[in-house]
Amino acid sequence: MSVQEDPYTSVEAIRELANIDPDMAKMLKDGSAGALASMSFEAMVQMFRQHPPPSSPQLKTEWSRYIKMRDGHTHEIRVYKPDDLAEGPLVVLIYGGGFCMGHYSQFGPYSRAIASLYGATVVNISYRLAPEFKFPTAPNDVWDSITWLVEPENAKELGLNLNKGFVVGGMSAGANLSAVFAQQWVSSAKSPSIGGVWLNVPLLFVDEIVPDDQRELWISKEQNAEAIIINKEAMDFIHSSYNPDVTSPDFSPVNQQGAHTGLPPTLVQVCGQDPLRDDGLIYERILRKHGVKTKLDVYPGIPHAAPYFFPTLPVATTHNMDVLKGFGWLLGKEASEEQYQVALKTMTTPV
């Protein structure tokens, strides 16, 4: 998207993105959206903690490994390989959950599809959760985990060929952590170079750090304050639990000195009824103006991460295909339409 083609440079155009999707409205009216549509975020966190995901089996193409963080804490990571176990690019996925809940298994369906389509090794990493582990534990864990993955002896053990690609991405809080990691990795001139970043419904701004020239367009926090899934109440709970220093580069990439220069191609995806919508729109615009190659997918009229929470929503199919093809763009690879359709059928909601 060029600057001239940006359709979201007026308050009016941005506001229209919150007009409810007709299929979403129907699901809410007939009750098919289920209990999540009326559940508070805090209740979701409690439900997740009361019913954690089961342990995953060790398989030929999919297994768990344990790695140590800087303070000695041990995390489980999940490795997904293509069927032929060939050496390929590395894709790191980071789950969402408002820094308060989440598990590597959330992205299992995506990980299997990406590994199969592109011959990649996909690794779903873990990080410690708030409120027990407040900021900056999560970004530290992400840094330590990915640093471990790309060390030559570990890359060899996992069958990685980092010359073929290195992509990092996540959803929501995971998108925040992906953006933070990518900016710090680039700013530190670390090797190997990151080839792409995927930011799905990212949290990137609070009022104190919104650029002055973008402030007029940062309206989604107020406009979608009463949205389902994530709303003002949820954001207050998240910030209270996570307790970040919002001026730190560990909280947002925009806080990094010399930010935005030299970043890899970045795919940004946002939902129209999401309080975080304009975080993604503004960040994509900033990157583009700094010469970063970007792709932007916008899904009007649906709440935060709706394709995950409401997988029968028709736009979820569009979204999931966009994700699959988007990773191809980030990796510089393509698959046939038939291969995309097969992968799409194997994908279910990763929450």
Image: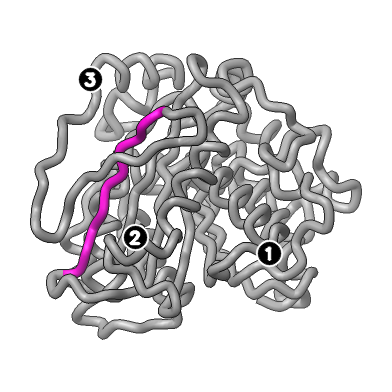
Q: Which mark is residue 320?
A: 2
Task: Give the CA separation, mark 3 to mark 2.
Answer: 26 Å
- Give whichever of discs 3 and 2 has the lower sequence position: 3
User: At 45% across and 21% down in the image, what residue appears?
Assistant: 41
For mark 3, does the 10 Å Cα neighbourhood hold few (<14), some (14 to 19), or many (20 or more) residues? few
User: At 27% across and 68% down in the image, what residue appears?
Assistant: 159
Q: Which residues are magenta?
A: 73-82
User: At 61% across and 37% down in the image, what residue appears?
Assistant: 275
- Which residue is label 3 attached to? 51
Q: Is residue 217 left or right of residue 309?
A: right
Q: Amino acid at mark 2?
A: Asn
Q: Which mark is residue 189?
A: 1
User: At 51% across and 16% down in the image, what residue appears?
Assistant: 131
Q: Where is residue 103 shown, x and y percent of the image? A: 33, 35
Q: Between 63 and 308, which is closer to the camera in this rendering?
A: 63
Viewer-side label of 3, 2 = 3
